[in-house]
Image (cartoon, helix red, strand yellow):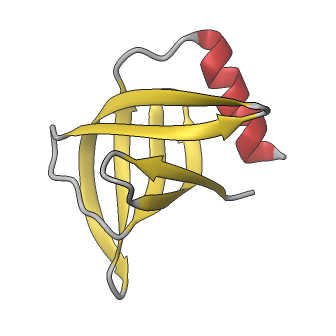
Amino acid sequence: MIVEIELDGGHKAEIHSLERNVLTFWSSRAFPPGAPVRFGVLIGEHRRVFEGRSIGARRVEGDRFEVRMRFVNLRRGDREGLLAAIES
């Protein structure tokens, strides 16, 4: 399942995968390597905010970019909740 997230600044994006500590999402905004990434997502009934650093971005279609990021402080419970949202 594709999960919608809200990046800082109100931009919408969609999570496509989470492998270990690396999240891949599609966005209309590109992030250069090392750029901070902060987003909010609804997990169950609670909104969680996550932070990380961009590994890089590449254009995938039209004005959309595939962004890969590494989490900065990802707690096990938050990771499990995020995985559950993606897999449902």
Picture coordinates of residue 45 (x, y %)? 77, 32
Identify the residue at the far right of this view: 88
Left or right: where does residue 77 sit relative to residue 61?
right
Q: Is residue 63 placed above or below 10 in the rendered structure?
A: below
Give the quadrant of the N terminus: bottom right
Picture coordinates of residue 48 (x, y %)? 57, 28
Picture coordinates of residue 79 (x, y %)? 61, 23
**Looking at the image, which residue is at 35% across and 40% down?**
69
* Closer to us: 79 or 46: 46
* Closer to us: 82 or 42: 42
**Looking at the image, which residue is at 44% across and 36% down?**
22
Identify the residue at the far bottom of this view: 62
Q: Is residue 10 placed above or below 33 in the rendered structure?
A: below
**Looking at the image, which residue is at 28% across and 64% down?**
29
Q: Is residue 68 placed above or below 12 in the rendered structure?
A: above
Left or right: where does residue 42 sit relative to residue 58?
right
* Closer to us: 11 or 64: 11
Q: Is residue 74 placed above or below 11 in the rendered structure?
A: above
**Looking at the image, which residue is at 24% across and 51% down?**
56
Picture coordinates of residue 54 (x, y %)? 26, 42
Left or right: where does residue 23 sit relative to residue 2?
left
Q: How many labels does the image show?
A: 0
Left or right: where does residue 35 sit relative to residue 8?
left
